[in-house]
Image (cartoon, grey):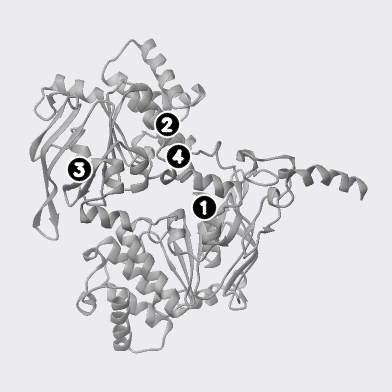
Amino acid sequence: MSTPLLEVSGLVKRFVARSGVGRRRIVEAVRGVDLTVAPGEIVAVVGESGSGKTTLARCVLALERPTAGTIRFDGVDVHRAGRRALAAVRRRMQPVFQDPYSSLDPRWTVDRSVREALDVHRIGTPAERAARVREVLERVGLPARFADRRPHELSGGQRQRVGIAAALAPRPDLLVADEPVTALDVSVQAQVLNLLHEIQRDLGLAILFIAHDLSVVEHFSDRVAVMYQGRIVESGATSAVFEHPADSYTQALLEAVPALR
Amino acid sequence: MSALLSAEGLSVRYRTPAGPASVVDRVDLSIAPGEIFGLVGESGCGKTTFALAAMGLLPADAETSGRVVFDGRDLLALDDEELRRLRGDRISMIFQDPLTSLDPTFPVGAQIAEAILVHRDVTRAEARRRAIELLESVGIPDAASRYRDPPHRFSGGMRQRVVIAIALANEPALVLADEPTTALDVRVQAQILALLRRRCDEHGTAVLLVTHDLGVVAEVCDRVAVMYAGRVVETGPAAAVLSSPAHPYTKALLAALPARTRQRGALEVIAGEIPDLVTPPPGCRFAPRCPVAHERCSDVPAMTALGDGHHGACWLLDGGPARAAASPVEEDGS
């Protein structure tokens, strides 16, 4: 196996939850997770609500500081890197969120949202940035006329395309996609999954795909890690895990999926 | 089969700044006692509006026509007081998010007892006894001791069980359930669906299950109606509709499911977007996106019977494009 692009080892994340009057409780959301993503690979983390999958993604994106463990991106320890090294990692690792309606600024045009990462990372001249925005919008199947629109003028599927275009703009190596199709209707979900697959194939991107929908994960990913109560209970090639689940939790999860036939 | 609830030509229009939007258009369907009837479709297809219309819960700017007959009475013609007496008694409703349908400050037991006291002339002690029984029947362990717990002490799945207990409190004949398991994890969903199924089988309760999830339909529904842009495009036994879909929209929806293929980038997609319901397409509303549309689709297709109660609203099921070419000739001759 090639050197991993992303390497999570021994990740632990605890939160202090305040419940009631003055009562404090420690919640261990992630309890020792090891996970790797190779360049160009699609790895899904699947689990129910509260399994810790979103906390894992937020630690990877350096939006949360781990309690213990390390996250390496292309050899760089993300949480111990200096500002400049972290900025470089952040450019190469882009998030795609569930609901583009809340992740896109409602006052900004599509053009500005997609350009933001280029502005932040000072990539290219203004003319080059404008060209890049046109290029990625075209890549996600949005005609140039969409550049002047604002989020409320777009359908759910179009908004998620804008979210993906914004993530692609700074030429990342890894997308961290947290439930990117959960808010979409089935027919729109199919369009967005196809688009993500095309982009992954054409650009050789790696994708860390966080999801709860088992049929989406089965269709979409190369490898899968099943999370339950903060731990990975089973992982492996997606087809192997779905055809021969070894862990009793994975089995229960798969059995509960309503089957069409 | 005698219908418990039947919609006859139900239409709902919302007033919008651009003009009236035809959100539900001439929907006919009927639900029998003891059956789970799935109303399935994507966002904006009118499935929730249909359920709200049946409960008299539409906003004031909605205009309705047609009839929704329950127990021989047209629900659209009832006044507020008559509807209030019916709701929570003979007909009840379950919504998607149990946290917003429960009062966060009241013990769950008291919320169930209240539902009983509003409609039944019983003592508080009797209402309490029944509430505990209901909590037990929906699978809440230690029901008596959890009676006083507020909703936040329950998990999402347990809260939805409480909501179901409230909905069943007065043994309704019909439960309208709008995406009752959408917010729940898959294992909890399976338990809640099994609970609803058992209730229908044992008590003859009918359920109108509004959902976007074809898997849920396959799991528990006896019959199903597929809606698109305000109209029912196909209806029939759930097994028949899912295994041999007749309408191009139903076919496309099934083909878009990721479970159908492992091939990358190869999910079937439905081109285009749902139509604007202020100015919907003149004939079949799916025609602008339909891969097999033809001239005849500019007329509204009639429901064609396909056997065993399976119906589809597509001209291809009714003679196909050949008849389409023939029809102008008939008109010329008349």
For the residues labelled 2 and 1, the Cα–Cα distance comes to: 23 Å
The answer to whether marks 4 and 2 mark residues whose Cβ atoms lie closer than 8 Å is no
Q: In this rendering, which labeled residue sits more in front, label 3 or label 2? A: 2
| Mark 2 residue crowding within 10 angstroms, few (<14) / some (14–19) / many (20+) | many
Foreground of the two, A75 or A98: A75
Residue assigned mark 2: A195
For the residues labelled 4 and 1, the Cα–Cα distance comes to: 15 Å
Left or right: B282, with B7 as reference point: right
For the residues labelled 3 and 1, the Cα–Cα distance comes to: 33 Å
Residue assigned mark 1: B41
Residue assigned mark 3: A55
Secondary structure found at label 3: helix
Report if residue B59 is visible in the image. Answer: no
Please state which amino acid type lies under the numbered disc 4. Answer: Ala
Residue assigned mark 4: A190
Query: Of marks 4 and 3, which one's residue comes earlier in the chain?
Result: 3
Can you say whether A72 is above or below B224 in the image?
above
Q: Chain of mark 3?
A: A
Q: Residue A155 in the image: x percent, y percent?
A: 48, 38
